Image: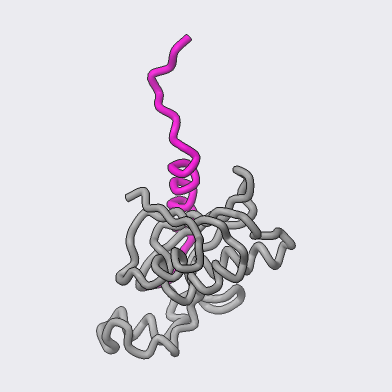
Amino acid sequence: MSSAVKRPSWDEYFLQLAEVVKRRANCLRRSVGVVIVQGKHIIATGYNGTPAGVKNCTAGGCDRCLKRHKNILKENERKDLCICIHAEENALLQSAYHGASTRGAVLYSTIAPCLQCAKAIINAGIAGVVFKENHQDNLGIKFLADAGIRTSSLS
């Protein structure tokens, strides 16, 4: 019996799940979702927003994001004041919190990692990164490639 329904590839499947995770993001500026996979099994998810137990960014928890949203601060200005955690960092922290090794895993993200997240991805032993959209710059992807980590875009 043949089926007319095309099954998504594994990369497409996990990126679609990252899109669902992204819906939990609570950052005013951008919503990002991440899924970390080890041998086709999800070991962690992450989305961007304030740390657990801190007032959500969308409720005014991050003063920097609120000022950016109101155009009081310019893009990339005073990033040091932002209390939000990136989705990649959140997923890596969840892996550590629950004792799941990320060595050799693949990270799926709705957007390419920034340079800061790329550094964490490298040191967490992630073997590959698959993303849907490019970041505003390509520094993170370049850094991952320089470290020998496979990257691919499914945009």
Q: How is the image coloured?
A: one colour
* Residue nearest the observer in this picture, 57 or 76: 76
Q: x and y percent of residue 31 in the render?
A: 40, 64
- Kindly tell me whether residue 68 is visible in this rendering: yes
x 43%, y 62%: residue: 32
Q: x and y percent of residue 24 in the render?
A: 48, 60
* Residue nearest the observer in this picture, 71 or 137: 137
Specify the quadrant of the image occupied by residue 131.
Answer: bottom left
Image: 140 above or below 39: below
Image: 121 above or below 81: above
In the image, is 68 to the left or to the right of 63?
A: left
- Kindly tell me whether residue 23 is visible in this rendering: no
Q: x and y percent of residue 37 in the render?
A: 59, 51
> Farthest right residue?
99
The magenta segment: 1-28
Task: Count up the numbered dots.
Answer: 0
x 66%, y 62%: residue: 95
> Farthest top residue?
1
x 32%, y 50%: residue: 155
Look at the image and say whether residue 27 sits in the magenta stretch.
Answer: yes
Look at the image and say whether residue 23 sits in the magenta stretch.
Answer: yes
Specify the quadrant of the image occupied by residue 3.
Answer: top left
Q: x and y percent of residue 64 in the render?
A: 39, 86
Image: 24 above or below 6: below
In the image, is 26 to the left or to the right of 54?
A: left
